[in-house]
Amino acid sequence: MRKLLIFLIKIYQVAISPIFGSKCRFYPSCSHYTKEAITSLPLHLALFYSLKRISKCHPFHKGGYDPVPKN
């Protein structure tokens, strides 16, 4: 499951993300954040933190440095 999710993220990074350009308000970007979370956390926590991070991606959140939490 992890390999599939990382593969899908890589497809997004190569094929879709360049179309929209670098507009992520966070560092690391949401896709890099999600890849790191998937590889370093239990899958249920990785998905939870990734969805939480993506939900903050709107004009009313300041963004900035937001690393993956340590387990």
Image (cartoon, rainbow, N blue to C red):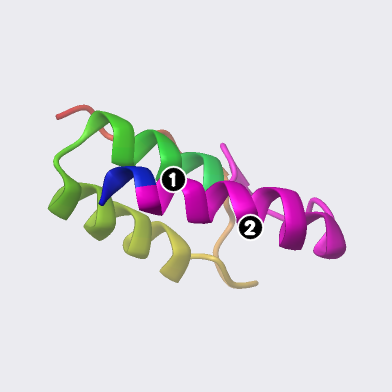
Residue 65 position, x and y percent, is: 53, 36
Please state, as top left, top right, bottom left or bottom right, where the C terminus lies in the image.
top left
* Secondary element type, mark 2: helix
Taking the spot 33% from the left edge, 62% from the top edge, the residue there is 52
Q: In this picture, is 31 found above or below 32?
A: below
* Secondary element type, mark 1: helix
Q: In this picture, is 20 found above or below 49?
A: below
Side (left or right) of 49 relative to 60 = left
Q: In this picture, is 69 found above or below 30?
A: above
Taking the spot 29% from the left edge, 45% from the top edge, the residue there is 2
Tell which of 34 and 8 is nearer to you: 8
Pointer 2 or 1: first along the chain: 1
Q: Residues within 10 Å of mark 1 (few under 14, many from 20)?
A: some
Question: For residue 19: magenta?
Answer: yes
- Using the rendered image of the protein, determine whether residue 65 is visible from the camera's viewpoint: no
User: How far is the residue under mark 2 from the one under mark 1?
Assistant: 10 Å
Q: Residues within 10 Å of mark 2 (few under 14, many from 20)?
A: few
Marks 2,1: beta carbons within 8 A:
no
Residue 47 position, x and y percent, is: 26, 57
Tell which of 20 and 54 is nearer to you: 20
Report the span colored magenta. 4-30
Q: Quadrant of residue 69?
A: top left
Residue 34 position, x and y percent, is: 42, 47
Taking the spot 49% from the left edge, 48% from the top edge, the residue there is 7
Q: Quadrant of residue 61?
A: bottom right
Side (left or right) of 51 relative to 17 = left
Amino acid on which disc 1 is placed = Ile
Point out which mark residue 20 bears.
none
Taking the spot 25% from the left edge, 52% from the top edge, the residue there is 1
Point out which mark residue 12 bears.
2
Label 1: which residue?
6
Amino acid on which disc 2 is placed = Tyr
